[in-house]
Amino acid sequence: DGGITQSPKYLFRKEGQNVTLSCEQNLNHDAMYWYRQDPGQGLRLIYYSQIVNDFQKGDIAEGYSVSREKKESFPLTVTSAQKNPTAFYLCASSMGPPREAFFGQGTRLTVV
Amino acid sequence: GQQLNQSPQSMFIQEGEDVSMNCTSSSIFNTWLWYKQDPGEGPVLLIALYKAGELTSNGRLTAQFGITRKDSFLNISASIPSDVGIYFCAGYYGGSQGNLIFGKGTKLSVKP
């Protein structure tokens, strides 16, 4: 079945450690996105990529990094520079413009 | 940056009642999307609207793209317990693929 897979579902890390969240899609979509969701808030864009080896900062890119070495994969690294990393992270993909972006099931990151 | 105002923030209704929620913006969008998110899961696309005035249904759900292109509404008829969740609107104003803006969501609770 085609879809977007995020792993792990839950992730715990100590403060000051970098952590990488995985996102894989087999929908043959060109574009991929990372969003952050906090309670009572809408989704805020961290990074997006329209094509392999290219990505752009979103509204809240500080403290995050990404790579797009393969069309299917768009991992997100939450670095120690991110001041408030505890959140629900959502990966999405779309064929072209994000008009019909499809989401993964999310990763809940807790930093202690 | 661009912002969407989504209302109401939350609704608590009786099973069988109809539900209406809306999103407004000070800016023009050329696409409106409606998503539903269950607790701990990623949003699922319900309805996509591409033209001003467009009215689209998906089962008991109906959404409309406002004539001014600055608003959209979602109606749910004859609510059932599985309608519980958070409903998000999202607007896309073209250009960069990162330009998909999300509302803060409407939390729907249904009492059997």
Image (spheres, grey):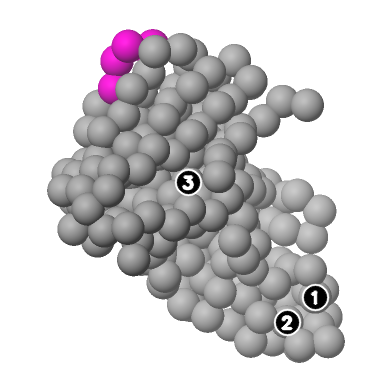
Query: What residue would you read off at disc 1?
Result: B81
Find the distance from the CA under tag 3 to the CA under tag 2.
26 Å
Q: Are marks 3 and 2 on the same chain?
A: no
Label 2: which residue? Answer: B110
Judging depth in this view, the residue of B96 and B78 nearest the camera is B96
Q: Amino acid at mark 1?
A: Pro
Q: Using the image, determine if residue A53 lies above or below residue B98.
A: above
Q: Chain of mark 1?
A: B
Report which residue position mark 3 lands on: A90
Left or right: A28 in relation to A62: right
> What separation in Å lies between label 3 and label 1 (alpha carbons)?
25 Å
B3 relative to B24 in the view: left or right: left
Pointers 2 and 1 in contact (C-beta within 8 Å):
yes
For the stretch drawn in magenta, the main secondary structure is strand
Image location (x, y in percent) of residue A45:
33, 44
Please tell me which residue is depicted at 55% across the width and 45% down the height of the picture: A8
